[in-house]
Image: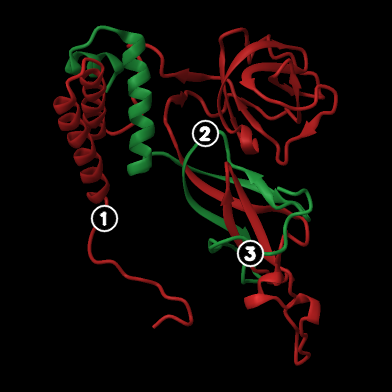
Chain colours: A red, B green
Amino acid sequence: MATSKEYAYYIKGNKVAIVQKDWTFSGGQTLSQPGLNDLGSQGALLWSSPIETIADGLEIQYAYSPTYFINETDDKNTAIDTYVSLGGLLKIIDQGDDNYSASPESLSDGSYIVLKKAGKWNGLHKVKEAGVGYVTLYTTFSGSASVQKSFEETPELYYNVDVLNDEADELDIPRYLANAVVYYVRAKYAEDVGELDMKEYFMREFRRITEKHQSAKKKGTYRVQGFSLMR
Amino acid sequence: MKVQEVMERAGIMDTGRAVAYIKDALEEMNIISETHITTERIDITKDQRFYNYPKDMIKVLDIRCKNHLNVDDEYRSIPRMIGEPLRKDADGD
């Protein structure tokens, strides 16, 4: 059976810091106590970097911008396993040597891919070059050119992707929210020509529609779930 | 709604600039009201404190850890610390 742990986080720059209470819960009737060196002001010394490796231990739920649309979720490749830096750009490598410039991926300069389950590389990327066993992206990456780093999970590379870049593209949001986008674009154009009153008006409409759409998704009263010490 | 319709409603002709502003709008919108959410799982590594956020992240909605205050392999939300712990990370970050 897994053991219970206690974690917390804090933000530092563009990273999330995970700390764990360096303290083992006692089992049965055996009480364990911290040593003298473990005690600090308000028990602060009990918190440290994670004390053990846990596969898939951290889960981050987040919102992302829908600037792309995956046409077919079946059109994916899961053979990518490592990455390196190539002249300051991210090069993802497939040890199995699939040919990414040939069908079905058919990637070339200017193509787009979406990576999922790729940790910090999640999201849309523009392809610079593709070949047997590799895809070089325009994404910048400062790292070793010789030591390959492994992805923590098996990344999913989606190659049938439609990117928001021309007039024929459809916004992947409800029609009501698309009206807010119109207001935002108007606000930006008003700002460009120095019409600041108009800009403020359009931005207010943008926020009004967005917030109205958000509140329209809720119904009824809120119910708060408390913790054991909360009344 | 297509990009073309947004441009017609806003009365603009410049596609490149319109698309750039539409992308800005989608980002701003997701900060206020989430339209697209996803979940990413990352390995927790012994003695490694700092982890990168995904590149496409606009707004964090929840941070959970496996077996946090449970023994059932559940992922539960973890609290945010006010301040940093006294024990610093070995890599000096």
Secondary structure beneath dot 2 equals: loop
> Dot 2 surroundings within 10 Å: few (below 14), some, or many (20 or more)?
some
Three-letter residue code for mark 2: Asp
Three-letter residue code for mark 3: Tyr
Instruction: List the residue tagged with mark 2.
Output: B56
Q: Are marks 1 and 2 on the same chain?
A: no
> Dot 1 surroundings within 10 Å: few (below 14), some, or many (20 or more)?
few
Q: Chain of mark 3?
A: A
Kindly identify the residue that appears in the image at 76 percent across and 76 percent down: A38
**Which numbered circle lies on residue A34?**
none
Q: Nearer the viewer, residue A101 or A11?
A: A11
Kindly identify the residue that appears in the image at 32 percent across and 32 percent down: A173
Q: Chain of mark 1?
A: A
Instruction: List the residue tagged with mark 1.
Output: A218
Secondary structure beneath dot 3 equals: strand
Query: Residue B79 appears at what percent x and percent y?
Result: 53, 64
Report how far apart the C-alphas of labels 1 and 2 lie in the structure.
27 Å
Report how far apart the C-alphas of labels 2 and 3 lie in the structure.
25 Å
Kindly identify the residue that appears in the image at 75 percent across and 83 percent down: A26
Q: Are marks 1 and 3 on the same chain?
A: yes
Query: Residue A183 appears at what percent x and percent y?
Result: 21, 27
Above/below status of A147 relative to A109? below
Q: Nearer the viewer, mark 1 or mark 2?
A: 2
Instruction: List the residue tagged with mark 3.
Output: A7
Q: Nearer the viewer, mark 1 or mark 3?
A: 3
Kindly identify the residue that appears in the image at 68 percent across and 64 percent down: B86
Q: Chain of mark 2?
A: B
Q: Quadrant of residue A120?
A: top right
Above/below status of B41 relative to A190? below
Above/below status of A42 relative to A154? below
